[in-house]
Amino acid sequence: MARYKIAVLAGDGVGKDVTEAAMIVLDKIKLDAEYTCGDIGWEFWCKEGDPLPRRTIDLLKSTDCCLFGAITSKPKQEAEAELAPELKGKGLVYRSPIVRLRQLFDLYTNLRPCKAYEGNPLVYKEGIDLVIFRENTEGLYSGIEWHPIPENVRAAIDSHPNAKKFADTSNDDMAVSLRLFTRKGCQRILRSAFEYAKKHGRPSVTVVEKPNVIRETSGLMIREGRKIAEEYPNVLLWEANVDAMCMWLLKNPREYDVLVSSNMFGDIISDLCGQLVGGLGFAASANIGDSYALFEPTHGSAPKYAGLYKVNPMAMLITTKLMLDWLGEHDMAQALDKAIAAVIAEGKVRTYDMGGDNTTLEVAQAVADRL
């Protein structure tokens, strides 16, 4: 029996291409694992009305972790238009399967390392080595939304003194997305960030929010951050407004170590940091809970490139390295990271985004050969 059971969800578009690349490397490493593929994505929304079938959820529950490719998401009306004819008009509403998985398995920590590998021509500045902790289950991505506004929700809105200017707006002409924070949600993402900084010798944690304007939710995150920071006297606590943080990351990215933020702000900041170190082709992530984890590159499904084996697989390979670390296979993870760094530094095998003409699988094979 294999030591690990790993679910493999390739998903849509280039998710299948980069997943194939990851398997080249995992086969070379000889991780003692049983891999089981599952159904997820746009195909299953269109023909079944559910991009995350129950059978896939059951599969994940029987495994130790999941390696995930990429997913296609579209707005409400476009998604409904692409349903099979027999499914239209039945009230089905598309919801991102990756968001559902994060909430279903309580994968509250989204970890996104952004490191500038030497020799990468796309790097903004050498020496960048950031790690972003993004709260993964609450905030504006909690999925609590209304349009049109129900009467009970409208009554609650109207009771607030700042709602007077909306008094003449009808319920049909108003939409609400709830930015919901809990003290527990704030505490556990903050603690994850400080624990990481302590374990890896990172000197500072920067809490990125907007408490001067979004006083209650961002304020709760900042207040909890100050309390938790007292438990880590060797880690500096810095605070930054999200808009200023974007400017400072462009100006002085090497001054920062660990960043921690709420769901949407963390999403934005991590994409900015990803671009600093070469773009989405180098942007990896881990969705981590107390007992399960899902690992995915942060790029989308890029349908126009699907099956062309054109996109850069490095984000997926770095994601695979994160999975190995989470499983406790630190020697394998370190070996993979060194192989990735060596291929980038040598510069002989590169995809189109780096100025080369090699395929996704050729890059993966070059990394595997370095192992």
Image (cartoon, rainbow, N blue to C red):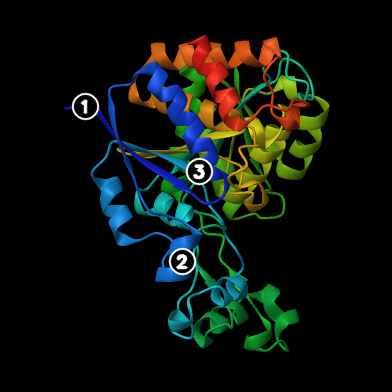
Task: Report the side of 317 relative to 326 (left or right).
Answer: right
Q: Which residue is mark 3?
A: 16
Q: Position of residue 319 (x, y in %)?
A: 50, 30
Point 27% across, 40% down: residue: 63
Image position, residue 165 (x, y; %): 75, 80
Choose the circle earlier in sequence order: 3 or 1.
Answer: 1
Task: Find residue 49 and name its label.
Answer: none
Q: Left or right: 195 with respect to 56?
A: right
As rendered, which of 292 and 258 lies closer to the eye?
292
Label 1 to label 2: alpha-carbon separation = 33 Å
What's the residue type where badge 1 is placed? Ala
Residue located at (62% from left, 14% from top): 343
Q: Residue at x 63, y 52 (%)?
A: 303
Q: Nearer the viewer, mark 3 or mark 1?
A: 3
Residue type at mark 2 is Trp
Q: Is residue 300 left or right of residue 118?
A: left
Q: Earlier in the sequence, mark 1 or mark 2?
A: 1
Residue at x-position 45% and y-position 77%: 92
Residue 229 shows up from this direction: no
Vertical comparison of 11 with 348: above or below: below
Q: Which mark is residue 45?
A: 2
Q: Nearer the viewer, residue 116 or 347?
A: 347
Residue that mark 1 sits on: 2
Residue 193 point in image, percent of width and height: 51, 30
Point out the image quarter for the N terminus: top left
CB contact under 8 Å: marks 3 and 1: no
Relative to residue 259, is residue 232 depicted above or below? above
How far is the residue under mark 3 from the one under mark 2?
A: 17 Å
Neighbour tally class for label 3: few under 14, some 14-19, many 20 plus, Cα within 10 Å: many
Instruction: Tell me how far mark 3 sits from mark 1, CA to CA.
Output: 24 Å
Give the amino acid type for the residue marked by disc 3 in the picture. Answer: Lys
Helix, strand or loop at mark 2 = helix
